[in-house]
Amino acid sequence: IFPEILVGLQRIYLRNYIIVSAKLLELAGMLAILLLGGELLIIITLTLSASLLTNLAMAVAALRLLPKLKLRLSCDRESLREVAGFSGFVFLGILGRMILSRSSRLVISIFCGVYEVGIFQLASKAGDLCNQAVSQYQENVSPITGALHRRGKFRMLGRIVLGSMRWNSFSAFGVMLVAFILIDPMLWALFKVSTDKYPSLALLSRLFIASMYVTVALRNVPHRFFLMSERHKLATAIVFGEALLNLALNIVLLWHGFGATTVIINSLVIKIVISAVVIVPYLSRVLHISPLNFLWQTVIAPFIIGIPATIYLVWLRDFTSLGAWPMLLAGGGGTVVLYFGLLVCLIPRRRLAKYVHKLFFARRRHAGPVEDKEDADERA
């Protein structure tokens, strides 16, 4: 509850400070336990305690920001009915996301055994790491979307949604391109696992990365936009329908002897179909932009800009004999120059100079006309 309150209060930075501090303390405690020969039970206790203390710290921060907020046990039917009108659908959406993320491993363990689950779990790690690297910006979408929708700033809201999706898509493609092509040295560097010993691991990992890219580029921002703009029923229907369809097809495919690879392929195909049939047409209509132009700005353009970086990464993988970490460092550095460098070059010079000037040289104005608070918030 309290992390979301801080997000709603537009104190995301405060929430992030608490999380980072707690994670550093948890890491230090875990290293100390391992060095002292501690057992797994002690590590689990430390992790749970750190999670509890993190949320308690956020509770203290939220209560200080909202001194009139009081927590007490009560039963108010009218309030419960009002909350259930929104939270009920949100809960179903959370349940659907849980089914999407957890049911595949359970179904694979039933039909294929523990070995396939281990490979499946290991293959998902590269995609999860990429998602964590590029998904932080999405946290800003919910409070901004809610504030603009409440004030009726629909034109600016459309620009924010489209701009957020473009930012997510470009950043996700640059990060995931390195992991997609250099998945073999990445798995060895992180987990000391050779894809020569497990042939299906590289394919599964690449499928996971592709699925995660579709999620980041076309699904995460629209989901938050739907929730905060009174379209929570649509968001719930999409997530829950996808979860049930994905679970049903996974059971059917595994029942007929297909392997774990079909599970992630099935998930990827369903995700692409729903994005193409439901989300892209709906957003195109809401944002008043053609579907082709929408796909060009959010999906096609990153692929075109990424061509030089792709050629470089393929050359680095196939024609050099670097170790795992040197190859990842060389691949990441080259991608920053070729992909993100080209992306910066495409920004008009006047706009880029304006951004740099605001970032480093802009000063607060203490004189001049006082602007309307709503206009100031909109500009911010």
Image: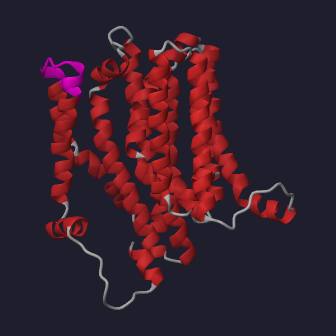
Q: Which residues fall within the magenta stretch?
A: 317-328
In the image, residue 65 above or below residue 301: below
Q: Quadrant of the C terminus?
A: bottom left
> Residue 295 appears at what percent x and percent y?
36, 54
In the image, residue 138 above or below residue 22: below
Asked if residue 280 can be seen in this view, the reply is no
> Residue placed at 87% from the left, 61% from the top?
77
What secondary structure is the stretch in magenta mostly built from?
helix
Nearer-the-camera pick, 139 or 17: 17
On whether residue 108 falls in the magenta region, the answer is: no
Q: Residue furthest bottom?
A: 369
> Residue 90 appears at what percent x and percent y?
66, 52
In the image, residue 361 above or below residue 333: below
> Residue 346 appears at what percent x and percent y?
18, 58
In the image, residue 241 above or below residue 231: above
Nearer-the-camera pick, 168 or 79: 79
> Residue placed at 48% from the left, 25% from the top?
30
Asked if residue 196 can be seen in this view, the reply is yes
Nearer-the-camera pick, 39 or 111: 39
> Residue placed at 50% from the left, 56% from the top?
222
> Residue placed at 48% from the left, 65% from the top?
144
> Residue 28 appears at what percent x and percent y?
44, 29
